[in-house]
Image: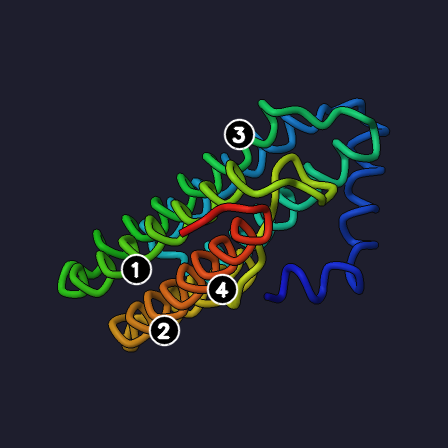
Amino acid sequence: MLDTSLRKHISFLFDGGAAFFEKLKISPICVTFIAFVTGLIASGAYLLGFPLAAVVVLWISGWLDAVDGTLARRTGKTSKLGAFLDVWFDRAVEGCILLSLGIKHPGASFSLLCSALAIILSMTAFLLTGAFVENKTKKSFFYQSGIMERSEGFIIFSLMWLLPKYLDLLSYLCAALILFTACQRVLLTVLALKQEGEKP
């Protein structure tokens, strides 16, 4: 939701980053890889006992994750490989965040598993929508927004790291919001396919 509604208001942050990397002649896929490694470092920082540093590094990773696409469009280097790696690396970072929380707080493993299951269901709907619904966006495949997107996820993950006392509550909240998003995506996909002539 925030990714979709606020992007136009803060696009200068990503445009500036894209211009910086373009000047350095760094490719979009390289920036995607840097974002991925930075996200892994964030989880490592949390495991080492530096939750505040982990949050800062995580948001830097998120910024880089937005810059790579901007850079690709700016330089005319959009690619299926870049889109593939971007989505896969995002899920890997999220998985490492949940893993870091599970290692530090084994008592919250069930609630964290609920969040992981919700992510699987939501991303399955997201990717299937991208595969079956006609793409009319600037992205590499049809992007369906929802109440829980990357920014909202980072906010909740940050709170999980900073407020472990409320980890179970935050995990269940995360799972509920992601499942709601999954249902949104399934419903909107069904409607979109029906408009394209698909019969139930």
Q: Is residue 109 left or right of residue 128?
A: left
Give 65 or 164, whichever is nearer the viewer: 65
Residue under circle 3?
84
| Disc number for residue 115 | 1
Q: Position of residue 181 (x, y in %)?
A: 45, 63
Q: Position of residue 170 (x, y in %)?
A: 34, 72
Residue under circle 4?
148
Q: Is residue 21 left or right of residue 181?
A: right
Measured along the vertical axis of the image, is residue 112 above or below residue 25? below
The answer to whether marks 1 and 2 mark residues whose Cβ atoms lie closer than 8 Å is no
The kind of secondary structure element at disc 3 is helix
Q: Is residue 175 left or right of residue 12?
A: left
Q: Position of residue 144 (x, y in %)?
A: 57, 53
Q: Position of residue 185 (x, y in %)?
A: 47, 57
The answer to whether marks 1 and 4 mark residues whose Cβ atoms lie closer than 8 Å is no
Q: CA distance from mark 3 to mark 4?
A: 21 Å
The kind of secondary structure element at disc 4 is loop
Q: CA distance from mark 3 to mark 1?
A: 23 Å
Quarter of the rendering containing residue 93: top left
Looking at the rendering, in which quadrant would you find the N terminus?
bottom right
* Amino acid type of the residue that numbered disc 4 sits on in the rendered structure: Met
Which residue corresponds to the image point at 28% horizontal and 48% vertical from the top-left? 99
Which residue corresponds to the image point at 61% horizontal and 27% vertical from the top-left? 82
Measured along the vertical axis of the image, is residue 129 above or below residue 164? above
The kind of secondary structure element at disc 2 is loop
* Amino acid type of the residue that numbered disc 1 sits on in the rendered structure: Ser
Residue under circle 2?
163
Q: Earlier in the sequence, mark 2 or mark 4?
A: 4
